[in-house]
């Protein structure tokens, strides 16, 4: 059992309900203190580096919610990934500061060949919240979850049978 707020759990569960989507988890980063010079450091490798390079680091009062998942490499997972790619792109086209991108570790690691074993996907959701109000952030995640639920329903996207 995790200690995520209900709104985060709801969105993670909605992602995990899509066929072929696995290992959904999330985190939050305060981006305001991240500077251009920090972006080459390995501790920041999970961040959307190209996006942050364009702004010279984090913006004032900026936080990023990151939802990470992997796929099981089935035909269903590719359909779910294609649907999510459209869904996230469509939100971004309408002004939501959100993106879907890939993430992987180097081909060789301390345990040998990692190539083919570390591919993950990140949904990066950027929010400016001057008040630091967690409730306002969670309300936006709840709206995101409701929007995903609506899109799944209207387009009759197959979900897992539990």
Image (cartoon, rainbow, N blue to C red):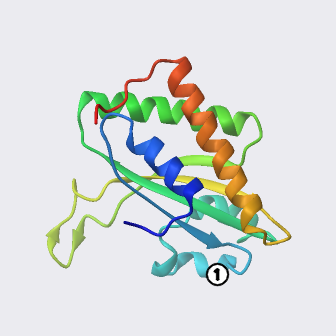
The N terminus lies in which quarter of the figure? bottom left
Percent position of residue 141, x then y:
64, 51
Residue beneath the point at 24% across and 39% down: 73
Compared across the picture, whether 50 is left or right of 3 comes to right
Q: Residues within 10 Å of mark 1 (few under 14, many from 20)?
A: few
Question: Which quadrant would residue 113 be assigned to in this image?
Answer: bottom left
Residue sitting nearer the eye, 85 or 152: 152
**Circle 1 — which element?**
helix
Give the quarter of the figure containing the C terminus: top left
Answer whether residue 123 is visible to the viewer in this image.
yes
* Residue 160 vs residue 75, the one in the foreground: 160
In the image, residue 41 sits, relative to residue 97, either above or below, namely below
Q: Residue furthest left?
A: 112
Camera-side residue: 10 or 112? 10
Residue at screen point 65% across, 58% down: 51
21 to the left or right of 83: left
Residue 90 is situated, as x and y percent measured from the top left of the image, at: 65, 31
**As drawn, is 30 to the left or to the right of 95?**
left
Residue 146 spot, x, y in % from top left: 62, 37
- Using the image as rendered, state which of residue 8 and residue 37 is in the foreground: 8
Q: Residue at x 28, y 59 (%)?
A: 118
Q: Is residue 136 depicted above or below 45 in this figure?
A: above
Name the image quarter holding residue 81.
top left
Q: Residue at x 58, y 64 (%)?
A: 49
- The residue at the far right in this view is 130
- Residue for badge 1: 37
Q: Is residue 101 visible?
A: no
């Amino acid at each position: 059992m995790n200690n995520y707020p209900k709104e985060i759990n709801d969105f993670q569960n909605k992602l995990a309900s899509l066929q072929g989507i696995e290992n959904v988890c999330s985190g939050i980063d305060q981006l305001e203190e991240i500077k251009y010079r920090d972006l080459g450091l390995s501790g920041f490798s999970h961040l959307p580096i190209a996006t942050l390079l364009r702004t010279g680091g984090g913006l004032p009062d900026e936080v990023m919610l990151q939802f990470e998942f992997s796929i099981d490499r089935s035909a269903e997972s590719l359909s779910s990934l294609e649907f999510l790619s459209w869904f996230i792109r469509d939100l971004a086209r309408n002004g939501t500061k959100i993106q879907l991108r890939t993430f992987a570790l180097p081909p060789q690691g301390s345990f040998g060949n990692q190539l083919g074993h570390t591919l993950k996907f990140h949904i990066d959701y950027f929010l400016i919240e001057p008040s630091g109000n967690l409730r306002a952030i969670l309300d936006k995640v709840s709206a995101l979850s409701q929007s995903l639920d609506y899109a799944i329903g209207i387009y009759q996207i197959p979900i897992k049978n539990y």
